[in-house]
Structures are given as structure tokens and as C-alpha cells.
Image (spheres, rainbow, N blue to C red):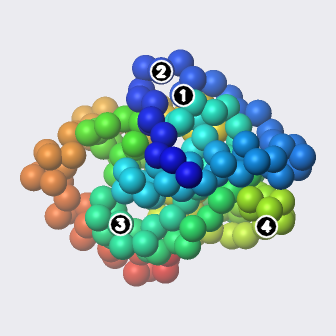
Amino acid sequence: MAVREILHVGNPLLRERSRQVTRAELASVEVQQLIDDLVDTMHAANGAGIAAPQVGELLRIATIEVNANPRYPYKPRIPLTVVVNPVIEPLDDELVEVNEGCLSVPNMRGNVMRHVNVRVRWWDRHGVEHDEVRRGLTAGTFQHECDHLDGVLFLDRVHDTRSLTTWDEFERFHRAAFIERITEFVERVGS
């Protein structure tokens, strides 16, 4: 297990579409090591998730976990989840405006619209198939990580560039209003 270097915006690998992982590849020592490294790297950076392209591997793999994360104290908990070859399908047209950041876009946040209710199908690290509905901020976290697998950064989804802010300025000017709004949303939606 190792903490890997996280690629930053401007690195061309972040803009490429990742390829599907075969079951044989998933069972390999190399891919299982990559999954362990993704978990370690996500934890070391206090991320809510990380995708393989963010460490330079163009495979459709991401890890997600929210457990008392100091970067995102308002996010509902998500147990450690490894998603391989995920497919996301919006269940309706309901959207929520979320202020997002990204480990590959250091010191930057911005508002994006995310689907509130999604169906996600994926394999876990052992090749077990999952088909689940994710809602609220949890749905947004899955969408964010899956975007990386298609070469999409949250910056591409910012609908009003005036919402872009550094972390310090977000904390200073925007955090309180965002926390109030998003807490009401979480209480309404439940996750």
C-alpha cells in the first residue's frame, strides 16, 4: 500500500476516458494494489473519493468514503466503497446545486448541479455486482468520481464561474450560507 501522487488540472491524463476493467484484471495483484493505493491516497488527502485517473491510471475504478471527513463535515457518511466499471443513471430530473472541490483541482471550489436521485451499477473489488439507488449528496459524490472516469472535472460542470473560490475565501465568505442550505437539503433528502 502506498500514497500516490495526485495529478492536477492541466495534466492531459485527467482529460482522457478510462477503459473498462476485465474480471481477470480486477483479480490481478496489480489492480488490487492500485485499489489499496487509491484508498491510502484518498485517506492521506482527506478526500471523499478518488478515481484511478487522478493517480495516472486510466482504468474505470474509484474509491469513495466519507467518515467524519474534516474537508466535508456536512456530508452524510459513506462506508468505504470501491466502484469498478460504474454506470450511473439519473432516476428523475431533480437537481441540487452543490459546492464542490476536487483533489485534482487544489484550493478551488465551485457550484455545480448534480442529480439528486441516481441508480448506480458497479462491481466491487472482488467482482461482486452492485445495483443501488443513491440519493442526495451521496449521489453527488458518486457522480463526481464517475465523471473522472470520463475525463470530466467539476470545473467543466460549474454553471456560473462567479461561484469559483479558493478554500480560504469559501470558508470566509460562503461556508455558513452553504452549510445552512445544504443541511436543510440533507435533512429533506436523507443522504
Q: Amino acid at mark 3?
A: Asn
Say which mark, if any, is on residue 130: 4
**What residue would you read off at disc 3?**
69
* Cα–Cα gap, marks 1 and 2: 6 Å
Task: Say if mark 1 contacts mark 4, CB within 8 Å.
Answer: no
Q: Position of residue 54 (x, y in %)?
A: 52, 36
Q: Earlier in the sequence, mark 1 or mark 4?
A: 1
Q: Earlier in the sequence, mark 3 or mark 4?
A: 3
Judge the density around disc 2: few (<14), some (14-19), many (≥20) Cα neighbours within 10 Å. few
Q: Earlier in the sequence, mark 3 or mark 2?
A: 2
* Cα–Cα gap, marks 1 and 4: 26 Å
Observer-nearest residue: 12 or 42?
Answer: 42
Q: Amino acid at mark 4?
A: His
**What residue would you read off at disc 1?**
14
Task: Say if mark 1 contacts mark 2, CB within 8 Å.
Answer: yes
**What residue would you read off at disc 2?**
11
Judge the density around disc 1: few (<14), some (14-19), many (≥20) Cα neighbours within 10 Å. many
Q: Position of residue 32 (x, y in %)?
A: 71, 51
Residue under the point 83% across and 65% down: 128
